[in-house]
Image: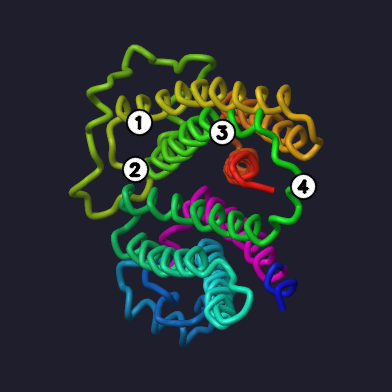
Amino acid sequence: MERKYKYVTLFACLLAAVVVTLGAYTRLNNAGLGCPDWPGCYGFLTVPDEHHEISAALQAFPDSEIEHGKAWLEMIHRYFAGTLGLVILSIALLALRRQTEKPLPLKLALSILVLVVFQALLGMWTVTMNLQPFIVMGHLLGGFSILTLLTLLYLRLNNQFVFTEEPKIRRQSRILFIALGALIVQIALGGWLAANYAAPHCVGLPLCQNIELFSLESLFHLPVGAANYEYGVLPFETRLSIHFIHRVWAMVTLVFLGFAACRVVVAAQSDLFKNAGRIVLFLLITQVSVGAAIVHWQFPLHLTLFHNFMAAMLLIATVRLCYLARCKA
């Protein structure tokens, strides 16, 4: 039973990674409003394609234009997200059933379930509030949080793989958690950048063209009061400033996380910790390089999608390293 539970949790981790990637792909293709309602699409469980279905959809939503490609992207994302929700529900129910014998991490499983329910609400509000940036960023962070907590649950179920406790590594845990905090801030900044369609407003390396327009004050110009937020509503200088802050904090994250991972690799005695630190370093260097390449090649879609995916992989690799540094053999 416990082994099956681990397999279900691992499947949920992989499915969450797919859902996060599909969400990024949907956002990058400007398909977030591909279906103007929720949870269906123009009142149907699939994208309407028959003549009578299209007629009914246009009558129900006269201000919308059916774009089948975007609508299917949105619905496929919802199908996968819904499947993930059901898998997480099964994880929570199995944890509840096992409390009388060899208990499973119930609090963590229930926390993930609550987060999934809130994430579904954010998904609904994303559509009904026409891509309001605060909601879009929250939805993105919710997806990353679910993936992270599922990874943490899987790690807790596999404590037996930590064969040794190294005091030198435990002493690095504080700087590791500071670096993790810096990474979380960077991911949030990336979500805010994406939610406000700010990527193309800062071209050139290492500084933006028109960098003289950068203003800390403009960062407090919030996107509120619009009827529709698709393609962004903030002025050019605000979006340029958002993007530039994301770049600056990327360097801060590079320094903190790179330093912390290097200290683990140098101090570690076992291959377990050395390899965990090396994985973080590899993903970190790759992520920074991909970010620079995206700007250099003018924001190609698939490279930008890979940048989103790598952010998720870097986050769970860092969480794993922090967990290993803190847990006891």
**Apparent side of residue 73 relative to residue 184 in the rendered image (left or right):** right
| Residue to which mark 4 is pinned | 163
Q: Where residue 134 sits: x, y (%)?
A: 31, 48
Distance from the alpha carbon under mark 1 to that under mark 4: 48 Å
18, above or below 124, in the image: above
Please state which amino acid type lies under the numbered disc 3. Answer: Ser
Q: Residues within 10 Å of mark 1 (few under 14, many from 20)?
A: many
Precedes in sequence: disc 3 or disc 2? 3
Q: Quadrant of residue 111?
A: bottom left
Which label was assigned to residue 239? 1
Query: Does residue 249 belong to the magenta stretch?
Result: no
Q: Where residue 280 sits: x, y (%)?
A: 67, 34
Distance from the alpha carbon under mark 4 to that under mark 3: 18 Å
Precedes in sequence: disc 3 or disc 1? 3
Which label was assigned to residue 173? 3
| Label pair 1/2, CB-CB below 8 angstroms | yes
- Label 3 secondary element: helix
Distance from the alpha carbon under mark 3 to that under mark 2: 40 Å
| Residue to which mark 2 is pinned | 232
**Apparent side of residue 186 relative to residue 154 in the rendered image (left or right):** left
Instruction: Please give the range of residues in magenta.
Output: 7-35
Precedes in sequence: disc 1 or disc 4? 4
Please state which amino acid type lies under the numbered disc 1. Answer: Arg
Precedes in sequence: disc 2 or disc 4? 4
